[in-house]
Image (cartoon, rainbow, N blue to C red):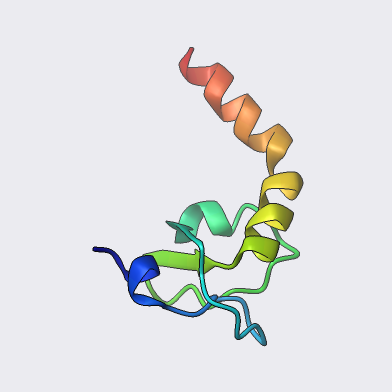
Amino acid sequence: MGRVDKGVNCSVNGCENSAERSISASKASMDSDLVVNTSNKRVYLCRQHYKEWKKATKEDRENERARWG
C-alpha cells in the first residue's frame, strides 16, 4: 500500500485535495507553471493538477519517448 492509497494530500502549493497520482520531482519540474514542494523525491498530484501537468508536458514526454524507441 502506497502513500496515495493512505490518503496523502496534493503537493501543489495551496491545494488540499487528496492525491491520485505520484510522479518524480524531476518530472514535475518539467512544467514551470506547476508550483510544487519538491523537497521530497516524489510529488503527489490530485486529479486536476495531474491533468494540467499531462497537458503541459505532452510534447516533452513524446520527445523523450521517441529518443528511446
Q: Is residue 20 above or below residue 54?
A: below
Residue located at (47% from left, 61% from top): 25
Residue found 65% across the figure and 83% down from its top: 15
Identity of the residue drawn at 75% across and 64% down: 33
Tell me: 40 left or right of 51.
left
Left or right of 48, for residue 6: left
Q: Up-down: is 13 above or below 27?
A: below
Quadrant of residue 31 in the image?
Answer: bottom right
**Residue 60 or residue 45, whichever sits in front:** 45
18 versus 21 height, above or below: below
The number of numbered badges drawn on the structure is 0
- In the rendered view, would you say 60 is above or below 8? above
Horizontally, is 59 left or right of 3 in the view?
A: right
The spot of residue 30 in percent (x, y) is 62, 52
Q: 47 or 61, which lies in front?
A: 47
Write the residue at 64% across / 27% down: 62
Q: Quadrant of the N terminus?
A: bottom left
Give residue 61's position: percent from left, percent from top: 61, 35
Question: Where does residue 53 sit, x and y in percent of width and height?
Answer: 67, 54
* Residue 32 location (% of width, % of height): 71, 61
Extreme left residue here?
A: 1
